Image: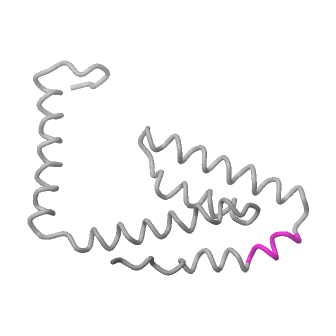
């Protein structure tokens, strides 16, 4: 039975910083909220378009966690899941890594072949 990972230290640091944040002017706090939601929306868009969604979303949640408890809970869950994924990735076998690399190279070769022999629109080849 797997034990649940400990709460990430970032969440505890943000919780400690929340008291200082609450003493800021309301206009500054509003800018934090707007910035946090902007980053969260940009990260959500990056889930379906190219971009570092898995970096931008936690940053947006970290900013929003200064104001909202729901953002702190989501950030904690996201960081715990990231730690679980990191541990699983570290436990992959050499064969799994080679298969992943081979699949990536084959995908790149297929796109290159399509570009040369096919007709990819908007690709100047």
Would residue 91 be counted in the magenta stretch? no
In the figure, residue 81 lies in which quadrant?
bottom left
Q: Nearer the viewer, residue 121 or 80?
A: 80
- The magenta stretch is 17-23
Residue at the location (50% across, 63% down)? 78
Residue at the location (35% across, 70% down)? 86
**47 lies above or below 52:** above
**114 lies above or below 99:** above
Residue at the location (15% across, 27% down)? 114
- Image position, residue 4 (x, y; %): 44, 76
Magenta stretch, overall SS = helix
In the picture, the quarter occupied by the N terminus is bottom left
**110 lies above or below 71:** above
Q: Nearer the viewer, residue 24 or 66?
A: 66
Residue at the location (19% across, 69% down)? 92
Q: Nearer the viewer, residue 104 or 79?
A: 79
Which residue is outermost to the front? 1
- Image position, residue 34 (x, y; %): 74, 49
In the figure, residue 67 lies in which quadrant?
bottom right
- Image position, residue 79 (x, y; %): 50, 68
- Rendering colour mode: one colour
Query: How many badges with numbers are in the image?
Result: 0
Image check: 22 left or right of 54?
right
In the figure, residue 89 lies in which quadrant?
bottom left
**103 lies above or below 23:** above
In the picture, the quarter occupied by the C terminus is top left
Image check: 76 left or right of 16?
left
Q: Nearer the viewer, residue 101 or 82?
A: 82
- Image position, residue 52 (x, y; %): 45, 52
């Amino acid at each position: 039975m797997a034990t649940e990972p400990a709460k990430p230290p970032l969440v505890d640091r943000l919780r400690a910083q929340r008291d200082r944040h609450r003493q800021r002017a309301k206009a500054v706090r509003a800018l934090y909220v707007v910035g946090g939601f902007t980053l969260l929306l940009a990260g959500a868009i990056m889930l379906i378009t190219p971009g570092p969604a898995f970096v931008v979303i936690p940053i947006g949640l970290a900013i929003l966690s200064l104001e909202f408890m729901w953002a702190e809970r989501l950030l904690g869950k996201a960081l715990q899941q990231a730690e679980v994924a990191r541990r699983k990735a570290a436990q992959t076998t050499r064969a799994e890594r080679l298969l992943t690399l081979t699949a990536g190279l084959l995908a790149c070769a297929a796109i290159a072949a399509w570009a040369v022999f096919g007709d990819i629109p908007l690709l100047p080849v």
